[in-house]
Image (cartoon, grey):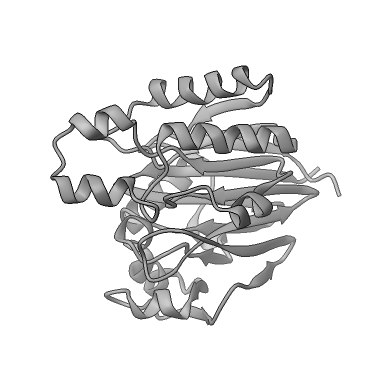
Amino acid sequence: MAACEFYTLFSGSSGNCEFIRCGKDAILVDAGKSAKAVETALKSLGADLSEVKAIFVTHEHCDHVAALPVIARKYGIPIHILSATAYEMKEVPATAVLHEGLFEESVGAITVNAFYTPHDSVRSVGYTICCGGHRFGIATDMGVIARNVVEALAGCDCAMIESNYDEDMLRDGPYPWHLKERIASTRGHLSNKNGALLAAILAHSGTGRIVLGHLSAENNDPEIALQAAADELKRRGLCAELDVADRNLPTCIFAGSITA
């Protein structure tokens, strides 16, 4: 029976990349850090960029797109990206497939749907991915829990969501005040408190596994983020499997088989 897998290759302020494989079909969401980092992470999972059939971009910040120009030149993989996002990049990948607005795209047995997220980029999106009878969600880089994001993610089997910073650590940390304000703004990033609330909303909708991602190295701690989410679910009498995506190594969000 064919495998259905969902991993973060790395997740944090220094780089983000997700890998989804359904049988012989595979995609990436974002490709931060470097092409070498993506290649190394995939190799550790017994995979290779040569089997990736498409890449989907969330927004133009370097921790999500830094590796794309090299990957495009070396592998020729189609890179799906909003036009507004592409025009803000320092180098538009040669294989860019431009979309003017929200879109749905099928890659073999995988179907990807974009939805908007509130972030301080020219335009930012998250994705839901349907494959092998499973539905996954990816939503990071957003300053508030928006209604459309909740509607997109509700009922996903598994989801990777943002829990970027601890409010006390951000307040007392080394960042300059203007950067602290940007992170905590409604177009910045989700705090542990709001990440925990989103986790609770998703658990209530039936999501069985929730992975907290895009944690700040300077303003967060995995144990603090995980405890905040666990406490929120317990307070509301909800259950879901919780984990934190590693900043530098692959983290399994789902590993199973195709059911339909």
The residue drawn where x is 53% and y is 28% is 243
Farthest residue in the right direction?
260
The residue drawn where x is 65% and y is 64% is 113
The residue drawn where x is 41% and y is 74% is 85
How many numbered markers are drawn? 0
- Residue 184 percent coordinates (x, y): 32, 45
- Residue 167 percent coordinates (x, y): 32, 32
Left or right: 161, with 147 as reference point: left
For the N terminus, the quadrant is top right
The residue drawn where x is 84% and y is 44% is 259
Q: Indicate whether 81 appears above or below 165.
A: below
Left or right: 181, with 151 as reference point: left
Q: Indicate whether 231 appears above or below 13.
A: above
- Residue 200 percent coordinates (x, y): 61, 32
Q: Indicate whether 11 appears above or below 222.
A: below
Quadrant of residue 223 in the image? top left
Which of 77/143 is in front? 143
Q: Indicate whether 8 appears above or below 199.
A: below
